[in-house]
Amino acid sequence: MSNHNGNITKYDRHWGRQTWNLNIGMLIFAAIFVYVIICVLMYFRTDHIVGYSVKEGSLTSNSIFKGLALRTEEIVTSDEAGYVNYFAREGERVAAGDLVYTVDETGRLADYINTSESGENNLSDSDLTELKTEISAFVNRFDRTQFSDVYNFKYSVEGTALKLSNYNLLANADALNNASGSTFINYRNAVKSGIVIYSVDGYENLTIEDITAELLDQDHYEKNHFVNNALVAKGDPVYKLSTDEDWSIVIHVDEALAEELLEKEYVEVRFLKNQYTSWGEVASYTNEAGDVFVSLTFTNSMITFCTDRFIDIELLLEDEKGLKIPNSAIVEKEFFIVPKEYLTKGGNGGNDGVLLETLDEEGNITTQFVATTIYDATDTEYYLDDSVLQPGNYIVKPDSTEKYAVSKTGSLTGVYNINKGYADFKQVTILYQNNEYSIVESNTAYGLNVYDYIVLDAAAVNDNQFIYE
């Protein structure tokens, strides 16, 4: 006889159903999770097609160079030893016979200048205006990266100020000569006309054939300035004359740019010092090291830059305007080329196409109209889509029995237009191109128009591919 304690365990009749519902929910959640993972993986593994809106623009191929100035320069040396005092301002033109400097053989004039005997040298209003103009011009063009220009400015102002004050001493110099009963202060005049320059740098006799890359390195450049009241020996240089208005600027370029400049013969140049422009005649020279140099010869403005050996210039080459597109959008594609007389219109919409020779079910030769897209045209031929024609196909001239074997091909440069939702090739004519963008001709028969949408990266799509983004 079994012993029961009277406890009865009650089982939930819905336990199995709840378990079943719980499993279904987990399965659905897992399926959604897997689907999301697959979508994410597909997203990152798929090449994303990005559109680009075509807009009008321009590309300027201006280039900035530091050039080396070459001029006709003659160094003048002293005929005697003594202290030199200058009376012609640097950068001004003197005529033959004009006073340029004096040589004090004894130093008495220098002592006289340094004592109160000479009295005060007051500058006139015009003299002060000359100094102010020179200072203002320097402040406006000063570049902190070229601090050596400060020293050039210093010597220039000193020369101007001393020249202006020295004119007051000419009468005193004559008095000293008369008092001594002999001539120990010698007057030296210009032997020919030219622009006076009070410095030498060893570049005076250079030609374009002498230029090297090292000479164009301004870090190794040294200029020797001539200062007022300095002691010189007989035969020492005291100034130089630039005697010809024709002068040149030499720049270091690559071979491609040199060829482009030579084709132009004359190039417009902007001088960054004063923003003036001038046209220079182009010549080039390649030295034994393979360095290519271009000289730009001018017939004016030499006096403005007569004291500058290195001059910053900008070449004003091109300013092409048209439709501006990124180079990544450009692609080349092959097409069949057929004579124009083989094209006709047909189909329900009167589309362009050709009469393709085919065989019917009974093996008889017949013709069938096949629509095809025209991508470019010359005077006698059309570039046709290669997706509907095959090499060796025959097309028939309308209203004739003449046939043409499809075989001739040619490539076109273009982009993929996505206005209609698929990659549609459009031919472009490149007017100018740099490393990032191209300017192409607008409003052409088979090309682009402003505000068209094109594929930014042509390598990411195939011909006639549908665009989902």
Image (cartoon, rainbow, N blue to C red):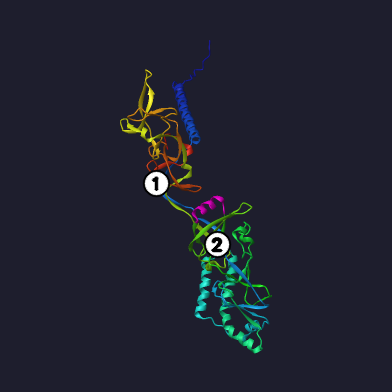
Q: Nearer the viewer, residue 89 or 469?
A: 89
Q: Which quadrant: the C terminus? A: top left
Left or right side of 373 for 312: right
Which numbered disc covers residue 248? Answer: 2
Measure the C-alpha gap from mark 2 to mark 1.
Answer: 40 Å
The location of residue 281, given as percent across then percent down, is 51, 59
Q: Is residue 141 above or below residue 191?
A: above
Specify whether 275 is left or right of 84.
left
Q: Which residue is mark 1?
A: 442
**Amino acid type at mark 2:** Ser
Q: How far across and down, in percent of the image, does residue 429 sit?
A: 43, 44
Picture quadrant of residue 152? bottom right
Nearer the observer, 182 or 232: 182
Q: Secondary structure under badge 1?
A: loop
Q: How many marks?
A: 2
Closer to us: 354 or 8? 354
Q: Is residue 407 above or below residue 313?
A: above
- Which residues, given as a range, are shown in magenta? 253-265
Picture layout, residue 72 above or below residue 446: below
Q: Given the image, on which type of amino acid does mark 1 rest?
A: Ser
Residue 177 is situated, as x and y percent measured from the top left of the image, at 64, 86
Magenta span includes 188: no
* Residue 118 appears in view: no
Q: Quadrant of residue 409?
A: top left
Mark 2 or 1, nearer chain start: 2
